[in-house]
Amino acid sequence: MSVEERAKSIGVKIPQAATPVGAYLLAVHGGSLLFTAGQGPVKDGVPVFKGKVGKDITVEDAYEAAKLAALNCLAAAKSVLGTLDRIERVVKVNGYVNSAPGFIDQAKVMNGASDLLAQIFGEKGRHARTSVGVSELPLNIAVEVDLVLACAP
């Protein structure tokens, strides 16, 4: 079963890759690793889940935002690789959470991305992770995620 078929079997569709909003690439494949640019919770070109987690957005909604951001990372990876079936392992997830003062549950938010990747890739989706609280994110999005993926040539 292909990666996209597995995603579809759990009710998830890999979206089309976004257009970069700055002077950067969506993803870069160097050697056996692919690095995605940070992606936010954007659907059909529109940022969703905006605001500070712990003030404007609940942990549960931010968890969903992290899932959507991770899907957008996979779309970026597909735009470079041609197919997600070349992904051999999710190596690292970096997550940035637009946090209200005193908010300390960034890891719970980033579980959205981690849980989704494990559902799609199984054991190969388990990864190292960093979850960081930040004071602001572009476009006031709640979460930004980037991935490091091990890929077949």
Image: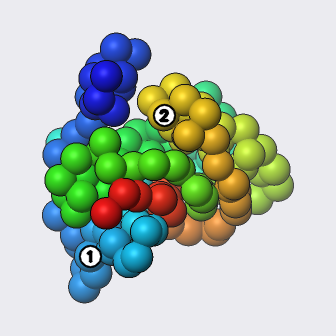
Q: Which residue is mark 2?
A: 121
Identity, as a three-letter code, of the amino acid under mark 1: Leu
Pointer 1: residues within 10 angstroms few (<14), some, or many (20+)? some
Drawn side of residue 64 relative to residue 86, left or right = right
Residue 32: quarter of image: bottom left
Q: Residue at x 40, y 58 (%)?
A: 151
Q: Residue at x 32, y 50 (%)?
A: 86
Q: Which residue is mark 1?
A: 25
**Camera-side mark, 2 or 1:** 2
SS under mark 2: helix
Q: Is residue 85 above or below residue 12?
A: below
- Position of the N terminus, as image quadrant, is top left
Q: Residue at x 47, y 58 (%)?
A: 149
Q: Position of residue 140 (x, y in %)?
A: 44, 60
* Nearest the eye: 149 or 134: 149
Q: Position of residue 61 (x, y in %)?
A: 54, 32
Residue pushed farthest bottom? 23
The CA span between labels 2 and 1 is 24 Å
Identity, as a three-letter code, of the amino acid under mark 2: Phe
Observer able to see residue 127: yes
Q: Earlier in the sequence, mark 2 or mark 1?
A: 1
